[in-house]
Amino acid sequence: MAQLTYRDAVAAGIAQEMARDENVVFLGEDVAAAGGVFKATVGLLEQFGEKRVIDTPISENAILGAAMGAAMTGLKPIAEIMFSDFLAVCWDMVANEIAKARYMTNGQVKVPLVIRTANGGGSRFGAQHSQSVENWAMAIPGIKVVAPSSPADVKGLLAAAVRDPDPVLFFEHKSLYAMKGEVPDGELVDELGKAKILTRGDDATVVALAAMVPRAVKAAEILKGKGINLTVIDVRSLVPLDTQTILAETSKTGRLFTVEENPRLCGWGAEISSIVMEECFYDLDAPVTRITTPHVPLPSSDNLEDATVPSVERIVETIERNMG
């Protein structure tokens, strides 16, 4: 086992797949010579050269247009959109072109493309650089949506995304880049669409994603000291969604809490809540409770941003109140 940071696991995952398959190429703004604005791709240019690690102009549409064309002609591109907020600039390429090419050609054209992007708050970048937009992507048929919470998951899920025949939006959380964790040595390939159970308890089930996962685990530790035992599930993949694990664990405990960084209105937890209410309503002892960011632009002020995004304290207080 090696100790890697989340950002180093990104580079390790990309390097693993580029070394394995010469058709894998990587492109984006400042990803080559500068090693990425978040230093998540350091060393790739030196290892694989400028024909496979490509700095692009500042144009999200150009990046994804080039990546889609490359994917359609046999390459396996990894394209970086620097901040997930900037997906709004090229959303037509994502939602109307990349997501629909395979369907509209009856499978004659495949788009094996990974779009990496830095998502979420915690870095005080303000309303235009801190959004958590994974629910945007979840709403579009034809793309897979992944958001890892640990270095090992970054490397393994990134490898799985590169090997997938369909387009994958890969949301890395910018506030997790410095996190360290154990990553298995050698080749690591995970499975898309498989949630992970991190803690087990009989009193309630908590589902969380990306940066909310370590907060949910910490809240579970605190609540255990108060006699409340939680099952914490890292969703990891929104599309495909591991409904079997979520439903099974919710049925065991009879209570479900979602912890979401995306704004409350139409967040991913609303879809999970709907599925749970339809599929295991009679196993529930209480309504599903969603712990979310309110439906507001994210502030840049330290205190205001911290008050807006779900904190460990708010998770503990909400679960304790509802369990009471």
Image (cartoon, rainbow, N blue to C red):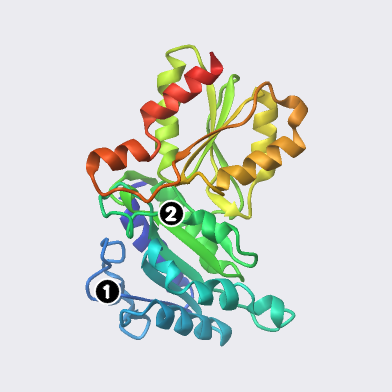
Q: Is 126 situated left or right of 110 in this image? A: left
Q: Which residue is mark 1?
A: 30
Q: Secondary structure at mark 2?
A: helix
Q: Secondary structure at mark 1?
A: loop
* Residue 263 % position (x, y): 47, 47
* Residue 260 % position (x, y): 48, 42
- Mark 2 residue crowding within 10 angstroms, few (<14) / some (14–19) / many (20+): many
Q: Amino acid at mark 2?
A: Val
Inter-mark Cα distance, 1 to 2: 21 Å
Tell me the residue at 68%/41% (across/down): 274
Q: Which residue is mark 2?
A: 154
- Mark 1 residue crowding within 10 angstroms, few (<14) / some (14–19) / many (20+): many
> In which image quadrant can residue 95 be found?
bottom right
Front-lying residue, 141 or 126: 126
> In which image quadrant can residue 254 be found?
top right
Tell me the residue at 63%/42% (across/down): 272
Q: Is residue 140 above or below residue 195?
A: below
Numbered badge on residue 143: none
Dot in front, 1 or 2? 1
Q: Amino acid at mark 1?
A: Asp
> In which image quadrant can residue 83 be found?
bottom left
